[in-house]
Image (cartoon, helix red, strand yellow):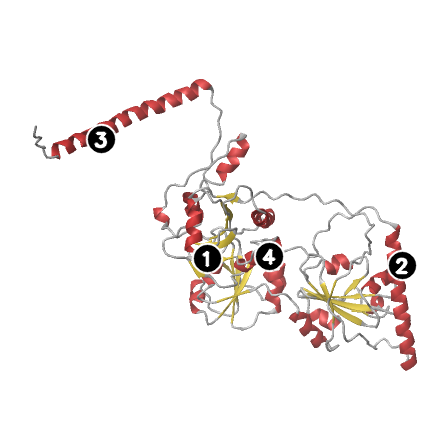
Amino acid sequence: MVQAFSLAWTAASLLLLPPAFANGLYSKSSPVLQVSGSNYDSLIAKSNHTPAYEKAAKSLNGLAKVAAVNCDEESNKPFCGSMGVQGFPTLKIVKPGKKAGKPIVEDYQGARSAKGIVDTVIDKIPNHVKRLKDDDYQDWLEDGDGPKAILFSDKGTTSALLKAIAIDFLGGISVAQIRDKEREAMEVFHVEKMPTLVLLPGGGKDPVTYNGEMKKEAMVAFLSQAASPNPDPAPKKAKASSSSKSDKSKASKASSSFSKASESHASSEAKTAKASQTMETMDDASQPSESPDANVVTEDTHKPVKVPDVAPPIQALPDAASLQHKCLNTKAGTCILALLPEETEPSPNTLQAISSLSEIHHKHETAKRNLFPFFQLPSSNGQAEVLRESLKLGSGVELIAMNGKRAWYRHYSKSTFGRAEVEDWIDGIRMGEGSKEKVPEGLILEAGELPPEPVHIQSGDPASMKEQLKKQVPKGVDFEFEELDESVYESIIAQASAETTPREAGEQKAEGGESAAKKEEEPIEHIEL
């Protein structure tokens, strides 16, 4: 008997595992993808989105992928066995997991109608769209300098289309939605009709209003002027060049297991009714599971050696003036600050916190995403102790997000500093989630009253010193290093000394005059002998 299975997967996707007619039932022009064990990984597991049947596939076009696998093909049997397929057709919903390339697979339990499948798959699409109101949209706009997009809508819910677009540009463009009742925001962006999509390209550029159809392809093209959409599927990584005999053994076992299951299913069908291409069976009670790897491997399989990409440590702010210039003034945007305790040797918590922040910052910088700056505050920075007292923080490692312009802060409340935990907290700040506390009076300085910002350079080779200076001078200011010979250097020092000496003499003369004036003003004392 010919057997196949259908797989659905979402940004979410739907995977159909029907009988072997998968290859013949769907034409090349069909919106249903034809998947095998060899291309499942690139088309589904590492996709940003997820699949269903032809009607559902048309409705989900651009939102999720719908694919079918022919389980009757010998080469696909290991894959179908690893997916736990026993009845035909079987439908699976595949949605993104926490680890890239390892989505979560669930059995589809709903109605086998196109509408039932579409509704379920759309419900599984992750929502990365921030809902904004008049009282918080300014905070969201000021979090980071990267591109942003806002959809003004008269709908109370977020559409599947906007969710899918947010996934396509995740990490490149922050996406938000504002209701038509938020009058202040509408006036600021001159919005007169619903729906209206506004792009804020970043970098000080003016907002751009989209005038085309609310179709995904056109909207993605419009937003692409500010950032490129994420590739789907993701670019392939280098694969291990060698394989072991145990790979074949495990693949053989999976294939054998699937064959037994399919034979058992065929036998069961034969007892009750003749086989039919329209018959559908599936297990009722199965739990979501991690997506299996279509290429079956074992512990003995050789894997490529990964060379770690070492993240440079985040910048340290050694004194109060540098902290005030970067974060504690009325024009400063959001900063992430790591307050470090006084200790002779860095503690495990200190090392973990700085490592996590450095890796997260390096990841966004490498991807050329504009994220707010991260700084570490050593205990020697006098302002660090002021922050601890004012915000009632402990004496250990403390992480805070501070926005000088809006005068709010958020405290990282956990006692451990693993990368995943810290990144979740930072992502919440990026998305404008969670409550904010008001910064106490006296911590934020008026931007016009800031003291001169010191320039700190560690000695080293000219290229290193130039890079350090670039990060501290204002944007648009350029400079060059020039090597001076000894005679020119001595001449410059002599000239500086010559200018300083008259000035110091004048100051001393002025001080002497003041002293003499003071003596004249003092009353004469009568000393009796």
Who is closer to the viewer here, 288 or 279?
288
Mark 2 or mark 3, which is nearer the start of the sequence? 2
Mark 2 or mark 1, which is nearer the start of the sequence? 2
Q: Amino acid at mark 2?
A: Ser
Q: Amino acid at mark 3?
A: Glu
Q: Mark 4 and mark 2: span between their CA atoms?
A: 40 Å
Residue 421's tag is 4
Q: Position of residue 232 (x, y in %)?
A: 69, 57
Residue 511's tag is 3
Which residue is identified by label 1?
409
Q: Quadrant of residue 428?
A: bottom right
Q: Mark 1 and mark 3: span between their CA atoms?
A: 47 Å
Which residue is identified by label 2?
252
How many residues crowd mark 1 within 10 Å: few (<14), some (14–19), many (20+)? many
Which callout, 4 or 2, points to the residue nearer the camera?
4
Mark 2 or mark 4, which is nearer the start of the sequence? 2
Q: Mark 4 and mark 1: span between their CA atoms?
A: 18 Å
Residue at the farthest front position: 529
Q: Quadrant of the C terminus?
A: top left
Lateral position of residue 113 relative to residue 398, left or right: right
Look at 44% across and 66% down and name the residue there.
134
Look at 76% across and 57% down and name the residue there.
41
Mark 4 or mark 3, which is nearer the start of the sequence? 4
Q: Amino acid at mark 1?
A: Tyr
Mark 1 or mark 4, which is nearer the start of the sequence? 1
Local secondary structure at mark 3: helix
Which callout, 1 or 2, points to the residue nearer the camera?
1
How many residues crowd mark 2 within 10 Å: few (<14), some (14–19), many (20+)? some
Q: Mark 3 and mark 4: span between their CA atoms?
A: 60 Å
Look at 49% across and 64% down and name the residue there.
435
Look at 73% across and 59% down and name the residue there.
45
